[in-house]
Structures are given as C-alpha cells and as structure tokens.
Image: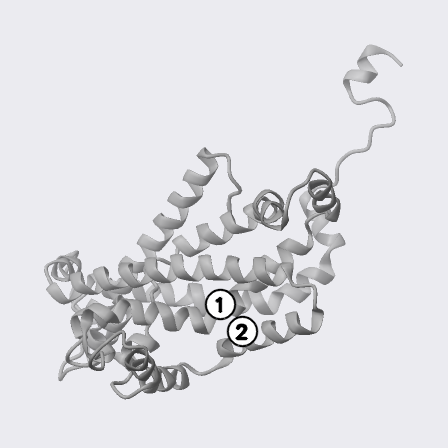
Amino acid sequence: MTARSIGNGGAGSVKKPGFFTKLGRQWQLIIMSVPMLLYVLLFNYAPLWGWMTAFQDYSTKKGFANSPWVGLDNFKWLFSNNDFLLSIRNTLAMSLINLVFGTVSAVLLAVLLNEVRNRRFKRTVQTVTYLPHFLSMVIVVSMAQNIFSSNGAINELLLGLGLVKEPVFFLGKGEYFWWLVGVINVWKEVGWGTIIYIAAMTSIDPSLYEAAAIDGAGRFQRILHVTLPGIKSTFMVLLIMNIGHLLEAGFEMQYLMRNGLVMKYSDTIDVFVMIYSFGGSRPHYAYGVAAGMFKSLVGILLLLGANRIAKLLDEETLI
C-alpha cells in the first residue's frame, strides 16, 4: 500500500453515511417521534407568540393588533412593584429549600434502599414512598392542614413530649411557611426522586464492591467510596436541571395554603401571575405575561450557567 493510499484512508476505506442516509434508515423511529414533536411544538413553542403581550397595553377588546405598544413599561412596573419583588424572594427561598431537602433525602433514601437485602421489605418501602407522588395536591394540602393545625398530630406530639407548652400556630406564621412547604414537598416526592438514583446504582459494577470488601472496607466506606462516586454523573445532571427550575417553586400548594397571615411568605411568581392576570375588576394580562417571560429567561440563564460551571469543573454536563 502506497503512502498516498494510506493518507486517503486506504483503498478499502468506507465512506461514512450522511445525515439524510442515517435519517432514512431510522424512519420508524422518526414516525414514532412525530406525535411528541407535534405536542412540543403545539404546547411549548406555538404559545411563544403571545410574548408580544408583555410589550403592549393589552386588552381583550382591542386584541393583539390594536393594543398600543408600551415597550419595557410593563417590566419597569414589575420591578417597582413590592408584591413582585416579594414573590421573587419567596420563590427563590422555597426553591432552594426544596432543592436541598429534596436532593439530600432522595439520595439518602436511595442509598439506604440499595443496602437492603430483603427484597420484599425493599419493594414495600419503595411502594409506600412512591404513593404520595400520585396524590392530588388538594388532598396533600388537606392532610397537611389537619396534621399541622393547632389540634393536629404534630402539636399533640410536641405537647405530649413536653417540647412546647402551648400549640404552635404552624399555618398562621409566615416564618414557618417556607419550611412547611419544604417538608410537605419532601414527603410527597422523595420516593419518586429515588427512582433515577436507584437505577444508577444498579449499573455500578459489583466487582467494585467485592474489591472494596477484600481491601477491608466496611459498609459505610463502600457507600462513600463506591456507591456515591458511581451516581455522581447522574447527580450532576439532575442538579443542573433542578437549578434551571429555581424560579418554579410551585403554585398549587402555595395557593391552597395561603391566607392573610402568611401572604407575604406564600406568594410565588406563579401565584403573582395568576392574581394580576385574572384577579381584580380589570385583569392585567400584560403584567402576568411579563412576569412569566422573566421567569423563563432567568431559568434558561440559570441552566446554561450551571452547565457552564459544571463543564469548567470537569463534571458531567447536560449540554
């Protein structure tokens, strides 16, 4: 074989198939993906044209075509509105609490379940912890209000143990609201959050555990040096995705549990959007759209920023 033929990849080199060739070979997968693609285009991208409302003094009577353009006035109003600034504070506070509590509890439960050798007990615990995820938020809030009420189970327990002298007003003190939402969210979602981590743990090579045991590592050391490093990439990807959702603390739980005593701590950006878009005698749709647009753009920036930092640290990235 001559140097020229070697430089050209040799006479027997095979030309890589082009993009459209690969596309044609996978036509079955493409057809299967069409319904989901249409769903995303219809419900995620098509509504984006409504963002123009954020730059208008929009009214339903005039419509999009005849509503006057106001530039950035709606955004200026948002950031001069104390209710909106409080909603940002509440959203970030509850999101951070949910992120820390939810991630730690999901990883901890997954590790504990991975160490259980009794399959029947393990499946029972998994089923019990998964079930709350499928409960309606209305039911969850109703249960929480009964449990944390002045004569509920938590106060009865605290009084019985002598930790408090009188019932604690959990549902009426704003400083308790963020932590209450965090506790309820962990109870509802911890089982569901363990699914991916348990799946990641099943892919860890069993020989690593055997080698660690031969070297004298105990159960805790095997968890620390084999299990946790084995799910590190999964943890990083999920963390990046969760950081991108920091401005999505929720709507249903906060709206259902809010009252006049905790309103300054309960209203998130989503609650603010609902109140100002549909509440009052004259709905301000433009304010709600501007707030939603701000939340989406900040979420994208947070996602890209977290992904960039992970890449600089040479960790697993999403993009």
Q: Image point 65% across, 63% down: which residue? A: 116
Horizontally, is 305 left or right of 236 in the view? left
Q: Is residue 248 above or below residue 171?
A: above
Asked whether disc 1 touches disc 2, contact meaning CB atoms under 8 Å apart, the reply is: yes
In percent of width and height, residue 77 lies at: 12, 61
Q: Is residue 38 above or below residue 221?
A: below
In percent of width and height, residue 90 lies at: 24, 64
Q: Image point 27% across, 60% down: which residue? A: 93
- Where, by quadrant of the figure, is residue 85 drawn? bottom left
Q: Is residue 129 above or below residue 69?
A: below
Residue 143 visible? The answer is yes
Residue bearing mark 2:
129
Residue bearing mark 1:
190
In percent of width and height, residue 177 lies at: 25, 71
Amino acid at dot 1: Val
Horizontally, is 54 left or right of 120 in the view? left
Q: Residues within 10 Å of mark 1 (few under 14, many from 20)?
A: many
Q: Image point 40% across, 70% down: which residue? A: 185
Q: Quadrant of the N terminus?
A: top right
In percent of width and height, residue 264 lies at: 16, 70
Q: Residue furthest right?
A: 1
- Where, by quadrant of the figure, is residue 269 drawn? bottom left
Q: SS class of the residue under badge 1? A: helix
Of residues 253 and 209, the one drawn nearer to the viewer in this rendering: 209
Q: What whole-number distance in Å separates the C-alpha atoms at marks 1 and 2?
A: 7 Å
Of residues 19 and 77, the one drawn nearer to the viewer in this rendering: 77
Q: Earlier in the sequence, mark 1 or mark 2?
A: 2
